[in-house]
Image: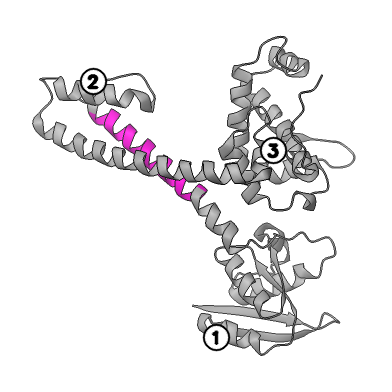
Amino acid sequence: MSFSFSGVDENEQPVLRRQIRRGEVAKFFAKLAPARIGIEACGASHCWARVLRGLGHEVMLLPPQYIKPYVKRGKNDKIDAEAICEAMSRPTMRFVPVKSAEQQAALTMLGVRDLLVKQRTMLINAIRGHAAEFGITVAKGSKQVPELLGRLASEKGVPALAREMIAMLSSQLDGLDIKLTAIERRLMAWHRQDQTSQCLATIPGIGPITGVSFALKVPDAKAFRSGRHFASWLGITPREGSTAGRQKLGRISRAGDEDLRRLLVIGATAVIRAAKPGRTAPWLLALLARKSKKLAAVALANKMARIVRAMMVSGETYRQPA
């Protein structure tokens, strides 16, 4: 595997065009004088940023969607390197904060947990589907699986081969539950020792998992100019197609971190489910009176995102509005 590099001088004139193999990258940059280096924020980019910073260089990570407008006709590594070089020179360009090895190690807990939850859902759906072939069904939810397995074991009309195959899936499900419990125990321990996560968990609809997710994935909330910019980064602001002075807003953009956006919407849905007069903000009750619960959940998630940004900047705990 090889990497392509493109460099310019202080007058924006091209002075470097190289293609280097992976094993020679560190040696090549160790010989260069300290420079400002731009890397597309992708897989392993944070690792390379730490390596190059250790060699004395200033490293900036650029979001791929901000590089694409500068790509000329065609698509290859050389053209992409020139586009990164061009995007680096823009005064309003936004960059991705470089994560430390410890932050990325903590993020693996969230990634592994999400993967195991998906695998558990797949196993439960498979067990329910196979059981339905023999006329055995139960209510939805992971808590109903033991009842389903008990009925499969006691039902006389189920062949032994089917019981054996479903038992194999059940054993895998038990192993996943043990692993998920261990990971969630580690996440709770991280939550207890992280001040930002504990602070965010005081917001209605945000629990320890969401608090830890924001604390790890948003290392510097001050990088966002306002709460609206933060909500836009998460993809829960309307997509705008305005022109000629006419404002035209569409659906939410969904352009940000999918996991953070999903956690906010799930938390907002939980708040709406428990909404009652006297306990819930009047604006939310009025919104629920004229809009569907799903639309209200997105609107509440947008408001929660702004509150999260404000609390991460100030360090204060949540105060219930009067």
SS for callout 3: helix
**310 with respect to 208 (left or right):** right
Residue 306 image offset from top left, x and y in percent:
76, 37
Q: Which of marks 3 and 1 is nearer the N terminus?
A: 1
Residue 149 image offset from top left, x and y in percent:
23, 26
Q: Which colour scheme is used?
A: one colour
- Please tell me whether residue 30 is drawn above or below residue 234 in the rendered image: below
Q: In which quarter of the image is the C terminus?
A: top right
SS for callout 2: loop
For label 2, the residue is: 136
**238 with respect to 75 (left or right):** right
**Residue located 67% across and 57% down the image:** 65
Q: Neighbour class for label 3 at 10 Å: few (<14), some, many (≥20)?
A: many
Q: Give the extent of the magenta segment.
A: 110-130
Tell whether position 283 is magenta. Answer: no
SS for callout 1: helix
**Residue located 73% across and 61% down the image:** 95
